Image (cartoon, coloured by chain):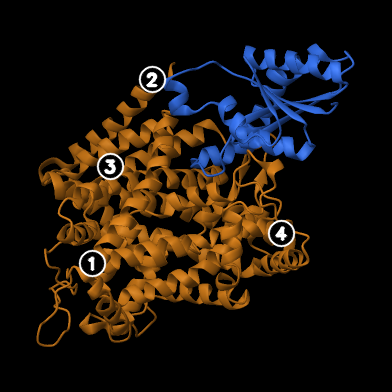
Chain colours: A blue, B orange
Amino acid sequence: MPGKILVAVDGSDAGERALAFAHARARQDGGSLMLVHVLEWSPYTFLTKEELEERHARRKQELARAEAAIIAPLAAKYQGQGVGIETAIKYGHVTETICEVAAEIGATEIVTGRTGNSGVMSRVFGSVAGTLAQIAPVPCTIVP
Amino acid sequence: MSIFTRFIAAFAACVAFSASLASVAQAQGIDESVNQIFLASTGWFVNFIFAPFPGTGFPWIVAWLVIAASVFTLYFGFIQFRVWRHSIQLVSGKYSDPNDAGEVSHFQALATALSGTVGLGNIAGVAVAVTIGGAGATFWMILAGLLGMASKFTECTLGVKYRNEYPDGTVSGGPMYYITKGFAERGLPGGKFLAVLFAVFCVLGSLGGGNMFQSNQAHQQLTGVLGQYPGWITGVIFAAIVFAVIIGGLKSIAQVTERVVPLMGVIYVGTALIILLMNYDMIGWAFGQIFAGAFTGNGIAGGMIGALIQGFRRAAFSNEAGVGSAAIAHSAVRTKEPITEGFVSLLEPFIDTVVICTMTALVIIITGQLTTDAATGLYVLGENGQIVTATGATGVGLTSAAFGAALPWFPYVLVVAVLLFAFSTMISWSYYGLKAWTYLFGEGRKQEITFKVMFCVFVVIGAAASLDPVIDFSDAAIFAMAVVNIVGLYCLMPVVKRELNSYLERLESGAIKRFK
């Protein structure tokens, strides 16, 4: 089924593998890709006065850095191979934001990598892939 | 030079200054000499600000604040009661565009501004108010808090509307900017003069109420637990930590404080609620005392007027409505609608004064700290005209005794809370003072360091001086800011009204979109 596949990327090798997988799928089915990178952010944290003042400038820097270091290289790698690629950088809670974007653009599938943390770490902090599998509004593929 | 060596060098300079104070002191002791110098150099200023109307005991400055808050309340049609629901929706993010995520949220702006105002004013200031003004002072404090919401709304809207934005994305705002730009826009004369005057008072206020009062009360609290020792010791330790943050650039300390202070606030209010629940049968009686005392004074010096003056004075000192400091804090927030920042800020006096200050007052009253004559039901007054307290404590010591009477372990928690509140308020005011200072002397590293070193020196002075002259000067400096700021607010309130009407119309018509 051709459609739009949302690929969650974070600059890790796992993210890259997920993108390679999703790209192969999209090319086969005649679909397109949406690369999404989420910067963890909560509007309910506490900031100092200086942080308040610098926030707008920092946000611009963070967006520029994410674009240059993560999104742009990945998009460039797969550009011009017959698969349409869109990109987005968002702020928010990682898994919730990915699901929101998926619903917004009418994605047919979410593809994500996994870091492979097991045991205590993922028990304490949870894992993005695990949570996505639980709450994704569309089929979700986790690429090892 | 590395940050560390610079830090050590500058700190050594501060210690050297303290040591030179010590040599001045010679036989009479550092604390006493600091006290004398302090009293001699600030007395005239305090006398001017608190001068009563001729033939009465009513300070003109208190009337000035109350009239202003009432004027704004009427002019904006009781704005504090009309929009509070919308304010809460704004804070909870219901009107935040998801595409703006990552910018400062309304919640963050409110939390940061609150951490600057919630502090010793709520703990020590209230104790001062009720020892001089009796339970009735609480009534006037609550009323002042409710009226103050309108003042805060006006100044914070203007703070955002007329801020300066720099190419690097940072912003500077506050009364000095809205007075200059707003007056120019409306073709009014004297904007520049008033702005400079405000900035001067703001520097004094940041050194007084924002600094000396804080270190003074922190020291009092420490001696209550550790036993008597000279104030300058607390001062030097506090100064070293403040120094590390504002000059040494140890941002992590400020960040940790910023996260722990709200937690302390919640613990404080939670504990007060527990004590009230433990004595639930006395809550009705306490409110009876508050209402009766508000109009009769129950025997305090000055009767009803005495209670009113104390209530209004401590409320203004605690929530800073009309003072202009909050306008500096809120102006850093990026929003398409300046008025929304006003809506959010009007919650501050409510949380600070109507909720937290009232809690403190109720705990002091219910635990029976204010001694009354069994026969007449009137307060027993000491030689200084203040109500005699059960343990003889005043200021933060009284609040501590009141909480301790119900929960014996709480004074230890309160020490930590007071130290943290004092510290976070100092850091906040060092920021306000710095903004005023750079407005006066220009942005630049040299100017900033000068102000910051001076700020640290005043931490030591504040801890060493005895309470009364420090409280008086702290109040005087902060109220002097209000004198100038409120003139500015009167002149610019039509601008706020235009913004308000336009926003409310668009909210009604659905042009202002709700996202959640």
First in sequence: mark 1 vs mark 2: 2
Q: Secondary structure at mark 2?
A: helix
Mark toward the viewer: 1 or 4: 1
Question: Residue under circle 2?
Answer: B4
Dots 1, 2 in contact, CB < 8 A? no
Share a chain, discs 1 and 2? yes
Chain ID, mark 3: B
Residue B216 - label: none
- The residue under label 4 is which amino acid type? Ala
Question: Residue under circle 1?
Answer: B364
Residue found 43% across the figure and 72% down from its top: B144
First in sequence: mark 3 vs mark 1: 1
First in sequence: mark 1 vs mark 4: 4
In the image, residue A107 sits, relative to residue B180, either above or below, namely above
Chain ID, mark 4: B
Relative depth, front residue between B440 and B481: B481
Which part of the image, by quadrant, shows the N terminus of chain B?
top left
First in sequence: mark 2 vs mark 4: 2
Is B12 on the left or on the right of B492, as rendered?
left
How far is the residue under mark 1 from the one under mark 2? 46 Å
- The residue under label 2 is which amino acid type? Phe
Question: Residue B292 at what x, y percent from top left?
Answer: 29, 85
Residue B451 visible to the viewer: yes
Residue found 42% across the figure and 40% down from its top: B259
Residue B460 - label: 3
